[in-house]
Each structure stands twice: as C-alpha cells, then as structure tokens.
Amino acid sequence: MNRMENPALTLLEARSVTRVFGKGDGTVYALKGATLSVGQGRLIALKGRSGSGKTTLLNIMAALDSPTEGTVFYSGRDGSRMTDQQKNEMRKREIGLIFQSFALVPHMTAYENVEFGLRIAGVPSSEWKKLAEQALSFVGLASRMHHMPPELSGGEQQRTAIARAIAHKPQLILADEPTAELDSRMGKQVMEVFRELVRTQGIAIVLTTHDPHIMELVDDVYALEDGRIGTESSKEV
C-alpha cells in the first residue's frame, strides 16, 4: 500500500450513473448504471474501446455534465443537490483536469499557463509564483518554464498541463487519454509523474486509456463496455 494511500477516504463515488442522449428512435445510452468508487491515493484507469462511455463518465465525474439517472458524490456531498455555481467552485478547488490535446495557451509560456490556471481556480495572487514554480519543478520543467508550448516537446507540453492541473493542490485529477498523443517513452514519463503524485501527495488520479502498457502502471483497472462497468482488476504497485 502507498504510504499516502487511504482507501477508507472516498473522494468520489458514482452510483448507478446512466447518461442518455437523444429521444425516441435516436436514443443513445452512453452509460447504463455505471458505479465506481475512487479512494484517496489511487491511480485508476478506465479502459474501453471508442464509444464505450469512458469520456462521458469522466465528464460526469468532473461535474461538466449531469447524469440522466444516478448521482455522483464528492467527499460525501451529493452532486445532484449542488447548484451549477457550487459545482464550478468545487471543480476549481478540488479537481484537476488534464486533456488529451494538452489545451495550453500557445502564446503563454509554461509558467504563464500554470499561473493562468491558478487565477481561474481563485488562488490568491500572492501564491501564484510559488505554486506555479513548485508544480513545474515537480514535473521536471524548472529549466523550461519560460518556454512557449511550440518550443516544448509533446511530453513537456503534457507535463506542463499536469503542472497546471496540480498547482492549486486538488484532491483528485481526471485525465482523458493523457498519453494518446505521445510516443511510448514520453507516455512512460507522464505515468511516472502520476505515480509520484499518488505516492508523495496522496492525490487520486482517474485516467481513460486503451493502451495496455499504461494499464500495467496503475493500481486499478475498470473496463467500460457498452456503457457498463464490467470486470475490474486491482493490484498493489
């Protein structure tokens, strides 16, 4: 067990989550009663082919979308009872989001991208410099923080995105295919950063992937098939 791991502390729990798009003959069930629990200090992978519901579930877990049925609890708080403003504040303070496409502002340096994320999260300006530099140093970019995204490799851009996601010290990180645009070496570097975050800071991370090599590096793997969470494998890393 990781020294920072506390499986008794549930950060997020999705209960019987169903998401329906369209009506009548055009009805599509993206999720069908999916249930998932995320404990502190766990690195979790959601696997499944395209269209299996991975991204839909991740968006609902991030409070970016609402389930048609079921609910998501955030540290015991019922998401269905939260207003949009409360969800937005919770997401800004407690969740870090990482996207497949990096989503960096191209005309800002790595440092400025991370600082911009702190502004959005509502962190006091007096803390921006310290937190941004700490996050970039953690992901190994202390010497590259004043470079623009086009001057960085794909792996460095994704590590900048990770720094932006962790700078405000969230409890949970949600990452949608974070290594899909990277080669195997850079993908492994990103996963090493994730494992270090879990080990040293007790952050919980949920990522979507279809890469079997990535699944070997996580604590738990959940399989999504036709909108349902199927077989689960767990292991101590």
Image (cartoon, rainbow, N blue to C red):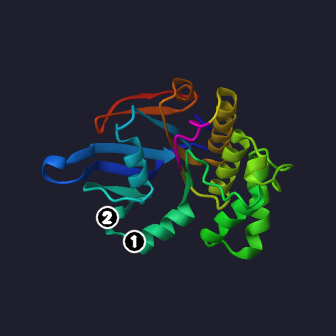
Task: Calculate the distance from the C-alpha at mark 1 to the C-alpha at mark 2.
Answer: 10 Å
C-beta proximity under 8 Å, tags 1 and 2: no
Number of numbered discs overlaid on the protein picture:
2
Dot 1: element = helix
In the picture, the quarter occupied by the C terminus is top right
* Mark identifier at residue 80: 2
Disc nearest the viewer among 1 and 2: 1
Dot 2: element = helix
Q: Where, by quadrant of the figure, is residue 60 drawn?
A: bottom left
35 within the magenta span = no
Image coordinates of residue 26 in percent, x first then y, are 18, 48
Image coordinates of residue 24 in percent, x first then y, are 13, 51
Q: Nearer the viewer, residue 219 or 182?
A: 182
Q: Nearer the viewer, residue 198 or 154?
A: 154
Q: Where, by quadrant of the figure, is residue 231 drawn?
A: top left
Q: Is residue 13 left or right of residue 89?
A: left
Q: Nearer the viewer, residue 73 or 168?
A: 168
* Mark identifier at residue 159: none
Label 1 is placed on what type of residue?
Asp
Q: Is residue 163 left or right of residue 85?
A: right
Residue found 30% across the figure and 43% down from its top: 34
Image coordinates of residue 226 in percent, x first then y, are 28, 35
Range drawn in magenta: 174-181
Q: Which residue is mark 1?
A: 84
* 87 relative to 26, above or below: below
Residue found 57% across the figure and 42% down from its top: 5
Instruction: Judge the density around disc 2: few (<14), some (14-19), many (≥20) Cα neighbours within 10 Å.
Output: some
Label 2 is placed on what type of residue?
Ser
